[in-house]
Image (cartoon, rainbow, N blue to C red):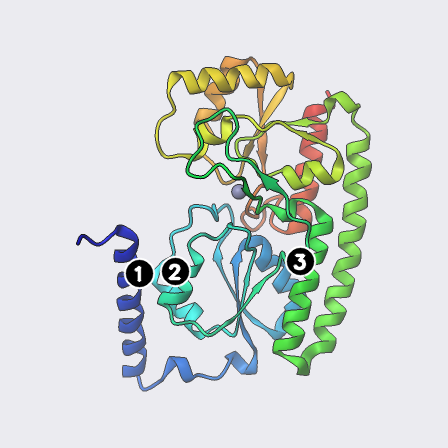
Amino acid sequence: MALRFDDFLSVFYAVATAMLLALAAGCGRDQTALPPVDGKPRVVATISIIGDWVKIVGGDEVALQTFVGPDGDPHEYGPVPSDNITLAKADVLFENGLGLESWLDKLYQSSQAKAARVVITQGIEVRHVAESEGMPPRGKDTGRDDPHAWQNVQNAMVMVGNIRAALVKADPAHAAGYQARAEAYLQQLAALDAWVQDQINTLPKQRRKLVTSHDAFGYFGGRYGVDISRSALESVTTEASDPSAKQIVDVVRQIEAAGVPVIFLENIQNPQLMAQIATEAGVKVGPPLYSDALGQPGTAGDTYIKMIQYNVRTLIKALGQ
Ligand code: ZN
């Protein structure tokens, strides 16, 4: 029986982990038995947005590593062997869940991790989306969970609360610090949530429409009253295969029907096809929005709060004209 590629990857990671652990042991140290860094809990965040929150709530009291970095696409992430080592040693693993990190279960197993898994979207109201409308369904067309919960700032507050609770549980000696930093940050998030709504309210109702290349902004639209055009753009821009001419024509028609002046890129995707489609639909391509990842350090979206502010300012500027 032929090994599937996924199976091959699992074996590869397991072997790579064993070899790296053996190397470490050869240096006279047993990595798995090392105490936490300077007594700090070792925590891992799957994506940059979660990493930002853990850094804020954890402060200097945790040793944090993040798997999918700035501008990285969490849907398409390919773990590297060092991720096995990181996870094997971790005490707590913070993940979004809702199907975002499809690669994580296998990584967790192959690294023989013992970290407590914390799904930080616990307690939010989960949004469900149908498989790509207007496109042939891929597999079961029963709808799936929308993982992009962070685009609603109120969800972010729930998620930060879950991070706080998990850190307090993992490291009760430093509970006061986790509580205080989370409290201060939650106040900033409450102010951000109100600010976003105020900004969107400045747009005429018929302008509150957003077309992007993948369906990342459903929670944003639901919370702040922006109509998200679920176009077939997602299908033609996120799959590896070249879209057919008919698919592109369908997308162009949908954009024309939506009556928007602009479509938006995202920081995690390739802009070329979007530019072509926009030209054919006679609309502009807006600047990239931050969808599933923070920007690189030093950019306008290098923290969660800055990313939301940047997205909203960009929308208002492009749609308000
Ligand atoms: Zn996404």
Which residue is rendered at x = 42% and y = 54% of the image?
103
Q: In this rendered view, identify the residue nearer to me: 3 or 314.
A: 3
Q: Name the residue under label 2.
A: 106
Q: Mark 1 vs mark 2: which is more N-terminal?
A: 1
Q: Where is residue 232 in the image (x, y as percent from the top left)?
A: 50, 26
Asked whether mark 2 lies closer than 8 Å to ligand 1, one says: no
Q: Name the residue under label 3.
A: 159
Q: Is mark 1 on a helix, strand or loop?
A: helix
Kindly report the distance in space between the C-alpha atoms of the residues bearing marks 1 and 2. 7 Å
Q: Name the residue under label 1.
A: 10
Residues tagged 1 and 2 counted as in contact (Cβ below 8 A): yes
Q: In this rendered view, identify the residue nearer to me: 118 or 45.
A: 118
Which quadrant, please, contains the N terminus?
bottom left
Q: How crowded is mark 1: few (under 14 residues within 10 Å), some or many (20 or more)?
A: some
Q: What element carries label 3?
A: helix
Which residue is rendered at x = 38% and y = 70% of the image?
85
Looking at the rendered structure, the kind of residue marked 3 is Met
Looking at the rendered structure, the kind of residue marked 2 is Lys
Q: Is residue 49 left or right of residue 246?
A: right
Question: How many numbered discs, if any?
Answer: 3
